[in-house]
Image (cartoon, helix red, strand yellow):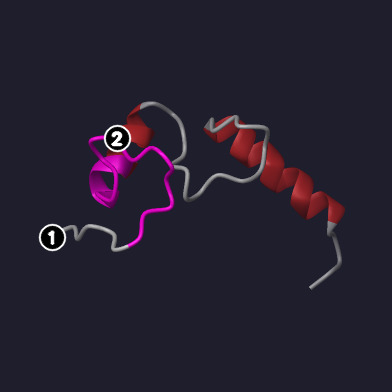
């Protein structure tokens, strides 16, 4: 399956060689244990996967029982 470039890239790093190239961007972030800008939650700029999971856990614990 071919990877298409994004028509609109949310990442503010327009000088990045992977800007608008989602497949290469995801591979790069996977290899660096971080999330692409378009996926990370508001967590004070920490894009690590651990921070992402901690933030999700916090969100679900705070909204327990709410659909």
Secondary structure at badge 1 equals loop
- Crowding near pointer 2: few (<14 within 10 Å), some, many (20+)? few
Disc sitting over residue 2 in the figure: 1
Quick one: quadrant of the C terminus? bottom right
Tell me whether circle 2 and circle 1 mark residues in contact (CB < 8 Å).
no
Q: Secondary structure at mark 2?
A: loop
User: What is the x, y in percent for residue 14?
Assistant: 33, 40
Numbered mark located on residue 56 in the image: none
- Position of residue 6 relative to residue 24, above or below, is below
Location of the N terminus (image quadrant): bottom left
Horizontal side, residue 55 vs residue 21: left or right: right
Q: Is residue 33 left or right of residue 20?
A: right
- Which residue is labeled 2 in the image? 15
Please tell me whether the stretch drawn in magenta is mainly helix, strand or loop. Answer: loop
Q: Is residue 22 magenta?
A: yes
Q: Position of residue 17 (x, y in %)?
A: 23, 35
State the residue at coordinates (38%, 26%): 32
Q: Distance of mark 2 from mark 1, alpha carbons?
A: 23 Å
Q: Nearer the viewer, residue 29 or 67?
A: 29
Q: Quadrant of residue 63?
A: bottom right
Based on the picture, tell me whether residue 65 belongs to the magenta stretch: no
Q: Position of residue 13 (x, y in %)?
A: 38, 37
Is residue 63 positioned above or below 35 on the image?
A: below
Number of other residues with Cα within 10 Å of mark 1, as a class: few under 14, some 14 to 19, many 20 or more: few
Magenta region: which residues?
Answer: 8-25
Task: Nearest to the eye among marks 2 and 1: give it.
Answer: 2
**Residue at image point 36% right, 54% down:** 9
Of 27 and 19, the residue lying toward us: 19
- Which of the two labelled residues, at mark 2 and mark 1, occupies the earlier sequence position? 1
Q: Residue at x 66, y 43 (%)?
A: 42
Nearer the observer, 16 or 61: 16
């Amino acid at each position: 399956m071919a990877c298409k470039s994004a028509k609109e890239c949310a990442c503010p790093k327009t000088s990045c060689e992977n800007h608008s190239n989602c497949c290469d961007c995801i591979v790069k972030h996977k290899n660096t244990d971080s999330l692409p800008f378009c996926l990370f939650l508001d967590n004070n700029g920490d894009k690590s996967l651990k921070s992402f999971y901690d933030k999700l856990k916090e969100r679900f614990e705070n909204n327990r029982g709410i659909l």
